[in-house]
Image: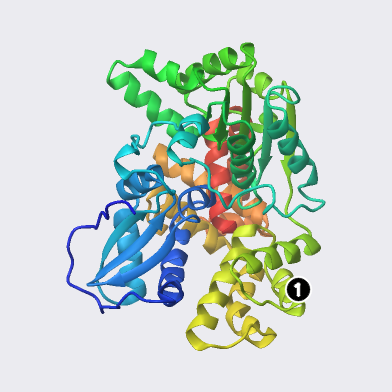
C-alpha cells in the first residue's frame, strides 16, 4: 500500500475499527457522499475520476479511500480532496479526515512509482511499466451495453481500437450528456493498453488542453507543450465543443491535429454536437473533424435502458427483479446518469434498511423524481435559470433597463420561453414587464440570428437548455 495522505486535521468523527466486511459498512456512507459529488460535477469528470474509487475503512476519524494508481491519487488529492471531505462530512453528520491509499500491484515498490503533474499526460507504455493506467478500468467494451441507439458508435469505436489509424481517422463521436461518450473513449484506451502496449496514448479533455496551453504560454514552454501531444500515437480528446470561440487554442489544436494525422496517428474526438453545428469553430477544423467517420449516440430505448440497469445492478451485486427494472426504465428519462442515480438511491436505502428491492420501494423513492421530470417548463423556471446564469436579479428581466448585459439576458430568456413553452407573444411580453409583442418577436429573431453566427451565444443557449432539462 502507498502512503496515506489525509486532509487537514478535523475533530474525530465516530471511530470504526477495521475488520472483515468493513467495506460493506462504508458503502452507505460513501454512496451518500458520491450522490452529493455527482450532483456537482458533469458526467465525464465523475466517470473519469470517481467511479474507480473504493471506500476502505474509517478509524480514528480518518476515512480511507482506495485509488487505482498514483496518477489518480495525485489528481484527486489536488483537485477534489476538499469536495470529498465536505461530502463525507455531510454523509456522516460529523467532520472527518480523508486519506487516499494506492493499491500497488504485486512486486511494485512504492518509491518506484512517479506521480505526474495533473496537467501531464500518461501513456499506456509508461503506465504498463508502473502498473498504472490513465483509463478507468471499469469502462470497457465488455461493460458497455449495446442497443439500437448506440450500436453504430460502439462498432466504430471497437474497429478503431482493434486497428488504430487504419479504419476511421479521425473518429468523431457525439451525443448528449450521459449517453456513453466517455465510456467509449475509456473503452478504447483500455483495449489499446491491453492489446497494443507499445503505443503511446493520451486522453485529455479540451479544457485540459486549454489549461496546458495557457500554462505553456505563461511559462514560455510552447515547445514542450507541442512535443507532449505530438509524441502520442493516439490522442483521445473529450468535449471538443469547448474549443469553440477560443482562437489560440484552436490554432494549436489545428497544427497538432495536422501533424498527428500526417504521421498516421489515430485521433478520436467526442462532443455534444456534430461538427456541422459547432458554429464557433474554425471552418478548417470543422472540415478536418469530418475527414474520417462521424458517429452519434442517441438516447437508449426502453429495452436498452432495462439492460443497462440490470448490467449496473449486477456490477454492484444488487438483486433487481425484471419488473422493477422495467418500472425504473419507464419512469425515468433516457440518459444513463439518471438510471445510475436511481440505483444509487436504491442501493443506499436497501443497505441502510435491509429491505429488498421492490416495486413499492421504487415508487416511494422515485415518485418525486418522475413527477419533477414530467413537470413542464414554466416562464418562471426560465427566468430563474437565466438570472442565475447571468448573475442578475429577477427584477432586471422585467425592468425597463436597457444596458447591454441585461438586454442580452432578456432577449435570451424570451427566446427560451418561445422555445420551451406554449406561451403566445403577448403572454411572453406581459411576463417581461408588459412589453409589446413586436419587441418579443424582435428579441427572438435577434437571438436566432446570433445562434447561427456566433458560437459563443449558441453555447450559452445550449448550456441554459441543459440546465433547464437537468
Q: Is residue 384 left or right of residue 302?
A: left
Residue 246 versus residue 258 in the image, above or below: below
Residue nearest the observer in this picture, 392 or 137: 137
> Residue 401 location in percent, x, y?
40, 46
Count of marks overlaid on the render: 1
Using the image, determine if residue 412 lies above or below residue 125.
below
Which of the two residues, 195 or 50, is positioned nearer the viewer here? Answer: 195
User: Where is 375 relative to 451, above or below?
Assistant: below
Which quarter of the figure is the C terminus placed in?
A: bottom right
Q: Residue at x 33, y 75 (%)?
A: 92
The secondary element bearing badge 1 is classed as helix
**Whether residue 427 can be seen here:** no
Is residue 66 visible in the rendered image? The answer is: yes
> Residue furthest toward the right?
148
- The chosen color scheme is rainbow
In the image shown, does 420 or 39 lie closer to the viewer? 39
Q: Residue at x 27, y 55 (%)?
A: 4
Tell me: 397 left or right of 165: left
Q: In the rendered view, would you say 118 is above or below 151?
A: above
Q: For the N terminus, give its image quadrant.
A: bottom left
Please give the name of the residue rendered at 61% of the width and 53% of the height, measured from the top-left corner: 178
Where residue 287 appears, as percent x and y from the top left, is: 68, 19
Q: Position of residue 198 (x, y in %)?
A: 57, 26
Q: Position of residue 144 (x, y in %)?
A: 69, 52
Characterize the local packing of mark 1: few (<14), some (14-19) or many (20 or more) Cα atoms within 10 angstroms.
some
What residue is pinned by disc 1?
326
Q: Quadrant of residue 451?
A: top right
Identify which residue, 43 or 19, lies in the foreground.
19
Q: Is residue 189 left or right of residue 154?
A: left
Residue at the extreme front of the image, as rendered: 107
Amino acid at each position: 500500500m502507498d502512503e496515506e495522505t489525509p486532509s487537514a486535521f478535523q475533530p474525530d468523527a465516530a471511530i470504526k475499527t477495521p475488520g472483515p466486511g468493513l467495506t460493506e459498512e462504508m458503502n452507505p456512507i460513501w454512496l451518500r457522499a458520491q450522490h452529493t459529488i455527482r450532483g456537482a460535477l458533469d458526467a465525464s469528470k465523475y466517470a473519469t475520476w470517481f467511479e474507480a474509487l473504493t471506500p476502505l475503512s474509517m478509524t480514528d476519524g480518518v476515512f480511507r479511500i482506495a485509488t487505482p494508481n498514483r496518477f489518480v491519487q495525485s489528481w484527486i488529492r489536488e483537485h477534489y480532496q476538499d469536495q470529498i471531505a465536505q461530502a463525507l462530512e455531510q454523509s456522516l453528520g460529523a467532520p472527518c479526515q480523508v486519506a487516499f491509499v494506492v493499491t500497488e500491484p504485486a512486486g511494485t515498490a512504492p518509491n518506484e512509482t512517479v506521480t505526474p503533474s495533473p496537467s501531464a499526460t500518461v501513456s499506456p507504455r509508461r503506465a504498463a511499466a508502473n502498473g498504472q493506467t490513465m483509463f478507468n478500468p471499469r469502462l470497457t467494451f465488455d461493460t458497455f451495453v449495446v442497443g439500437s441507439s448506440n450500436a453504430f458508435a460502439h462498432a466504430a469505436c471497437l474497429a478503431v481500437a482493434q486497428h488504430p489509424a487504419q479504419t476511421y481517422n479521425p473518429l468523431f463521436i457525439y451525443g448528449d450528456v450521459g449517453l456513453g461518450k466517455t465510456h467509449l473513449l475509456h473503452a478504447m484506451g483500455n483495449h489499446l493498453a491491453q492489446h497494443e502496449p507499445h503505443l503511446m496514448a493520451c486522453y485529455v479533455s479540451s479544457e485540459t488542453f486549454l489549461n496546458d496551453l495557457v500554462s505553456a504560454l505563461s511559462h514560455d514552454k510552447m515547445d514542450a507543450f507541442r512535443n507532449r501531444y505530438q509524441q502520442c500515437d493516439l490522442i483521445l480528446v473529450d468535449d471538443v465543443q469547448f474549443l469553440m470561440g477560443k482562437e489560440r487554442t484552436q490554432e494549436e489544436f489545428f497544427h497538432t491535429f495536422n501533424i498527428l494525422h500526417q504521421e498516421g496517428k489515430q485521433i478520436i474526438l467526442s462532443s455534444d454536437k456534430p461538427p456541422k453545428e459547432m458554429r464557433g469553430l474554425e471552418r478548417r477544423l470543422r472540415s478536418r473533424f469530418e475527414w474520417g467517420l462521424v458517429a452519434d449516440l442517441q438516447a437508449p430505448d426502453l429495452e436498452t435502458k432495462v439492460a443497462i440497469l440490470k448490467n449496473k445492478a449486477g456490477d454492484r451485486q444488487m438483486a433487481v427483479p425484471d419488473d422493477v427494472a422495467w418500472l425504473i426504465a419507464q419512469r425515468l428519462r433516457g440518459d444513463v446518469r439518471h438510471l445510475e442515480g436511481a440505483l444509487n438511491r436504491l442501493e443506499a436505502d436497501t443497505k441502510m434498511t435491509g429491505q429488498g428491492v421492490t416495486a413499492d420501494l421504487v415508487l416511494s423513492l422515485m415518485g418525486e423524481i418522475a413527477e419533477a421530470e414530467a413537470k413542464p417548463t414554466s416562464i418562471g423556471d426560465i427566468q430563474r435559470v437565466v438570472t442565475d446564469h447571468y448573475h442578475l436579479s429577477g427584477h432586471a428581466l422585467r425592468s425597463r433597463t436597457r444596458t447591454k448585459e441585461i438586454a442580452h439576458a432578456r432577449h435570451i430568456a424570451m427566446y427560451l420561453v418561445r422555445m420551451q413553452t406554449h406561451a403566445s407573444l403577448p403572454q411572453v411580453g406581459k411576463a417581461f414587464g408588459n412589453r409589446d409583442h413586436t419587441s418579443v418577436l424582435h428579441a427572438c429573431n435577434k437571438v436566432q440570428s446570433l445562434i447561427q453566427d456566433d458560437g459563443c451565444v449558441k453555447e450559452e443557449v445550449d448550456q441554459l437548455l441543459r440546465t433547464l432539462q437537468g
